[in-house]
Image (cartoon, rainbow, N blue to C red):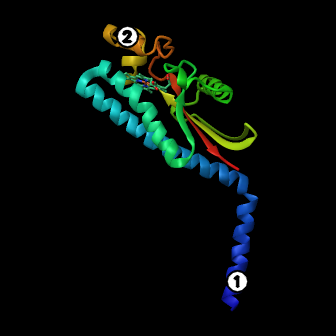
Amino acid sequence: MRRAIIGGLAGIAVFATAVAGGAETDLDTRTAASKAVIKAFAGSLQAELKGAMKASGPVAAIEVCNEEAPAIAGRHAEEKGWEVGRTSLKFRNPDNAPDPWELTALQSFEARKAAGEDPAQIDHAEFVMQDGKRVFRYMKAIPTAEVCLNCHGGAEVKPDVAAKLAEFYPDDKARGFSVGDIRGAFTIVQPAE
Ligand code: HEC
């Protein structure tokens, strides 16, 4: 009996702590869950890209990016009931154009990078009201690596690659990047009501 009471009191103490730290805990939990999905999303994308580049070169890999990137994002979104995608200030696919919240975040990412932050560590998490509903939003910056320049660089983009990109994306803005630049960001929206 005594043990049960002590246990009960300890339970109340834990509950009280959880409530006091509730807001922050929820933000942290949702951030961690978002990071896990992004890790899986990025891993699948990288594997697809690497495989296609190795098997058939960058021209063929463009089609893989075109089909697989939205498909993989869609699978994660469906599994979680979230919105999952990629966006950029200089986007290739108009479907990836940033909304106002994403635009502000991407601009702040550029400012943080300019102030010396490592792009690989730059992210932002926030609860916001969207269409009258409370949502959790998360973005994580995507740094540009050497391999990305095959399709997102300047002079590094070979003429046959440039021609194929122009065919798929006549308004392509995602060119002229250098290693270390912020290519864009992963973006997640979780319902939070
Ligand atoms: C084989 C060519 C190719 C390579 C290499 C490549 N990409 Fe892309 N990238 C694309 C294509 C094609 C799209 C458009 C995908 C779509 O239609 O959603 C794209 C889109 C993106 C987007 C989404 C935003 C936008 O511009 O529409 C990001 C972010 C991105 N790439 C980052 C990278 C990074 C980082 C690397 C290097 C690790 C990389 N890409 C390498 C072809 C490539």
Residue name at image x 68 percent, y 43 percent = 135
Q: Position of residue 11 (x, y in %)?
A: 69, 74
Three-letter code for the amino acid on which mark 1 is drawn: Ile
Residue 24 visible in the current orientation:
yes
Q: Is residue 68 above or below residue 6?
A: above
- The residue lying toward the viewer, choosing from 89 and 92, is 92
Choose between 9 and 128: the one closer to the eye.
128
Rendering quarter of residue 42: top left
- Against 140, residue 113 (above or below) is above
| Label 1 packing within 10 angstroms: few (<14), some (14-19), many (20+) | few
Instruction: Indicate the secondary structure of the residue bearing disc 1.
Output: helix
- Where in the image, quadrant-wise, is ligand 1 located? top left
Q: What is the secondary structure assignment of the residue under circle 2?
A: helix
Q: Residue at x 29, y 28 (%)?
A: 52
> The residue under label 2 is which amino acid type?
Ala
Residue carrying label 2:
162
Looking at the rendered structure, which numbered label has been put on residue 61?
none
Disc on res. 6: 1
Judge: label 2 CB < 8 Å from ligand 1. Answer: no
Please identify, in this view, whether the residue under mark 2 or under mark 1 is nearer the observer: 2
Residue 27, image x, y percentages: 66, 48
Question: In the depicted view, which residue is nearer to us: 27 or 143?
Answer: 27
Q: Marks 2/1: CA distance?
A: 70 Å
Q: Position of residue 98 (x, y in %)?
A: 61, 25
Contact between labelled residues 1 and 2, with CB atoms less than 8 Å apart: no
